[in-house]
Amino acid sequence: MTMTAKAKWGRFALLVMGGGTIYKLANLKDVFYVPMQDHLGLTNTEIGLLLSVNSIVATALFVVGGFLADRFRTRTVISAGLIGAGLLGLYMSTFPTFSVLTVIFALLAVCSDCLFWPALLKSVRQLGGKEEQGRMFGFLEGGRGIVDTIVAFSALGIFVLLGSGIAGFRAAIITYAVIDIAIGILLFFLLRDSSETPSVEATEAKQDKLKVFEAFKIVAKLPQLWLVSLTVFMVYIVYVGLTYFIPFLSDVYGLPTALVGVFGIINQYGLKILGGPMGGFLADKKFKSSSRYIGFSFLALLPVMAVIILLPKTSNFTVAAMIMCLLFSVIVFSMRGVFWAPMDEVGIPEEISGTAFGIASLIGYAPGMFGFLIYGAILDANPGTTGYYTVFMIMCALAVIGSGVAFTVARMARRKKTATMAA
């Protein structure tokens, strides 16, 4: 491996570390859904409301984040987001009231989705060439999965060690917060300005001449951006539903809290390790198109969900239910691993990619504003299997729509490629 390649993958590893830590606090429900109910006294709807507030603020600030990503150094923006999230986590560990938790979840969105995420996406795109965009974003998702899993199992281990009660839950939150702060400081000192890709200086010179409103105007006139954004939207709204496999196994199959936590780590984090790289490899090597891969993957979700719904709800089928839920999730994570790769397929100009990612994130991640709230309200209004079946059927319907959108993007990318070759 050449020094240039080592530097490239070294920078990538640092970015993965940040990407695998910053969302832990805003997504406590992934591992500690039941403890949030038990020790914070939250209902499904209230948990959904916290997540919706987080997503509303994130969505409102994604475009601002894209602007910041185009105009400030990566280490400054990313480190500020991580350290800020960690400080908020330390305050969250005091178990404040629901109204204060609402403010905390809003501010976590500022740190992660405004300061951190658009800068991360832009950095990863710049690290990979045109022929490896699927793999770079796939490895990002897979690498985040490794970091996610290690950090989450560490927090769960502390939770169990301290008796799986309120003290353990508080210690788990503090663990997440301290890791965020530590990684933020580490990135600030190791992700030096000189670690930017060689083309960044030239790119930033062009950006300085490009006024922010002109950038928005250019991006807004790109129909391919809106279709890619809608593809991300459809993947993400199905992804939101994965959270409810966790209480589903607890309520319907009677899994104990600790085992539900283990499942949650595997379901929400561990599968990134497999799903992200798998999606990147298949998209680049087999399907030759990330958008085509996403379209077929949406369709593959339907028979898996059919089995989940039809399995008998007895303890004899608990393992089978867990396996099918994990299979559904790994397909979704394989799509998440590549759902930004079509940005390059459809020809989004790199010099405005930060702004483009900001606008696309605003649309793509919008389901977080209402998905958790709607799904949670459905479960509270329809206790037992009826509520879960309703949520799962909605996810299937959305997958069908998503496949149509993804195939439309694939056709657009194919026409662009044909036109480029003809020229």
Image (spheres, rainbow, N blue to C red):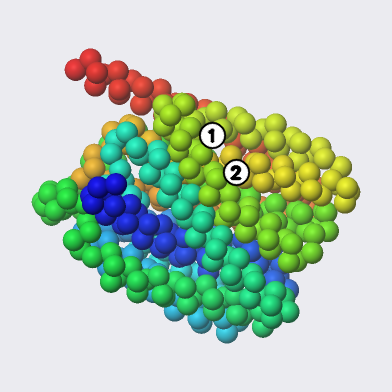
Q: In this rendered view, identify the residue nearer to me: 300 or 133.
A: 133
Depicted 193 relative to depicted 6: above or below: below
Q: Quadrant of residue 58?
A: bottom left
Name the amino acid, label 2.
Val
Query: Is any atom of residue 191 visible in this view?
Result: yes
Mark linked to residue 7:
none
Residue in view at x 84 percent, y 45 percent: 317
Pointer 1 residue: 402
Q: Is residue 143 left or right of residue 124?
A: right
Disc number at residue 330? 2
Question: For the view shown, which residue lies furthest in the front direction?
Answer: 1
Front-most of residues 304 and 53? 304
- Tell me where residue 348 appears, x and y as whole percent: 28, 37
Q: Which-is-in-front pick, marks 2 and 1?
A: 2
Quick one: label 2 or label 1, which is nearer the N terminus?
A: 2
- Marks 2 and 1 in Cβ contact (< 8 Å): no
Amino acid type for the residue under numbered disc 1: Gly
The image shows a total of numbered marks equal to 2
Q: Residue at x 69, y 71 (%)?
A: 35
Residue closer to the observer: 303 or 66: 303
Q: Residue drawn 63% across and 76% down? A: 158
Query: For the residue labelled by badge 2, is the local secondary structure a helix, a strand or a loop?
Result: helix
Q: Could you tell whether 231 is left or right of 346 in the image?
A: right
How many residues crowd around disc 1 within 10 Å: few (fewer than 14), some, or many (20 or more)? many
Element marked by disc 1: helix
Report x, y in % for residue 258. 73, 66
Residue 8 placement (x, y as % from top left): 28, 51
Distance, label 2 to label 1, CA atoms, is 17 Å
Relative to 406, residue 415 above or below: above
